[in-house]
Image (spheres, helix red, strand yellow):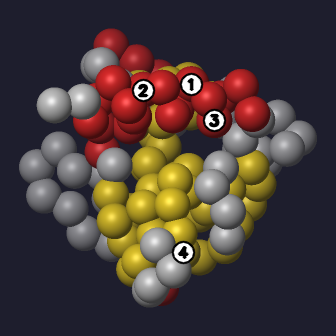
Amino acid sequence: MRKGDICLINLSFGAGHEQFGERPAVLISDTKTKIVIVIPLTANFESLRFPYTLAILPDAKNNLKQKSVALVFHLRAIDKKRILKIIGRIDLKSQRKLDEILKQMLEL
């Protein structure tokens, strides 16, 4: 698994506004343990109204089935067992934008 992979993950439970269910996510870091850091995606394009989001359109490389929004503010650490499969990769331009958004969000 590599940074930028789009994985289908199973977030079987969530509370309040947390993302849950089976959904794609962008892999941000493989911690070399049994935990990975991911950014969940949603098909709800209205989510772009929130800060720390990025539109990702379907293409042959990422294999997404619909227009998606990366919810960077939902950054999560998950067990690798939650990864069902790797379905594609985001393009370099989107990866750079995600890195920039992450940096802005995590600044103290």
Q: Which residue is mark 4?
A: 83
Front residue of this view, candidates 93 and 12 = 93
Mark 2 residue element:
helix
Q: Which residue is mark 3?
A: 95
- Amino acid carrying mark 2 in the image: Ile
Mark 1 residue element:
helix
Quadrant location of the C terminus?
A: top left
Look at 45% across and 84% down and name the residue there: 33
Q: Which residue is mark 2?
A: 101
C-alpha gap between disc 1 and disc 4: 24 Å
Please identify the residue farthest to the top as the structure is shown: 49
Q: Which residue is mark 1?
A: 97
Q: Are marks 3 and 4 in contact (CB under 8 Å)?
A: no
Above/below status of 45 relative to 70: above
C-alpha gap between disc 3 and disc 2: 10 Å
Above/below status of 55 relative to 88: above
Among the two numbered marks 3 and 4 on one chain, the one whose residue lies closer to the N terminus: 4
Among the two numbered marks 3 and 2 on one chain, the one whose residue lies closer to the N terminus: 3
Look at 42% across and 61% down and name the residue there: 37
- Amino acid carrying mark 4 in the image: Ile
Mark 4 residue element:
strand
Q: Are marks 1 and 3 in contact (CB under 8 Å)?
A: yes
Quadrant location of the N terminus?
A: bottom right
C-alpha gap between disc 4 and disc 2: 24 Å
